[in-house]
Image (cartoon, rainbow, N blue to C red):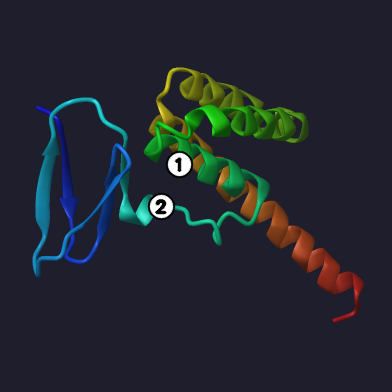
Amino acid sequence: MGLVLKVKAGDRLVINGAVLRNIGKSQMVVEVENRSDVLRGEEILGEAGACTPVRRLCHMIQLAMVSREGRGKILPRIHAAFEDLSEIMAKSHGSVLSEALTKVGEDNFYAAYRLLLPVIKYEDELLAIAARTDQEGSGS
């Protein structure tokens, strides 16, 4: 049995770079029978949402996932982003970043993306703390 996906009416799905949209009025069920790069609509991180270092890395990974032709250009940027983040987050998430980079090396971009989700959450927490500190420091 392959990967079974349920796509709500109006939702998008990316399979091997092809963007599919369920234009029907009801849920669509799709089975992907072979290994494919699949990204569900709610997982797609647009360029506007890629506003932090980890989110930018995830966005680049998604671009590599859906564009086999563009991978050669984006992979060096992905490796550089991993290197930068590893220097900053070695203690907190070094092993996760290393494992995600290994998945990128295996062309398993979806697994790399999924491994980075807790790192996004951690980054969001750090940014929230920094924002509160800035507010307190400015006397607001």
The x, y position of residue 103, in whole percent, is 47, 22
Quarter of the image with the C terminus is bottom right
Residue type, mark 1 in image? Gln
Choose between 134 and 8: the one closer to the eye.
8
Q: Residue at x 50, y 37 (%)?
A: 61
| CB within 8 Å, label 2 to label 1 | yes
* Residue receiving disc 2: 44
Tally the marks.
Answer: 2
User: For this view, does 134 lie left or right of residue 84?
Assistant: right
* Vertical order, 102 against 89 (above or below): above
* Vertical order, 56 against 51 (above or below): above
| Residue 87, picture quadrant | top right
Task: Please identify the residue farthest to the front as the structure is shown.
Answer: 69
Per the rendering, the mark at residue 62 is 1
Q: Earlier in the sequence, mark 2 or mark 1?
A: 2
Choose between 73 and 100: the one closer to the eye.
73
User: For this view, does 62 lie left or right of residue 80?
Assistant: left
Choose between 54 and 136: the one closer to the eye.
54
Q: Residue at x 62, y 44 (%)?
A: 54
The x, y position of residue 104, in whole percent, is 49, 25
Q: Residue at x 66, y 26 (%)?
A: 94
User: For this view, does 140 lie left or right of residue 89?
Assistant: right
The x, y position of residue 82, in whole percent, is 65, 30
| Residue 77, picture quadrant | top right
Dot 2 alpha-carbon crowd within 10 angstroms: few under 14, some 14 to 19, many 20 or more: some
Q: Secondary structure at mark 2?
A: loop
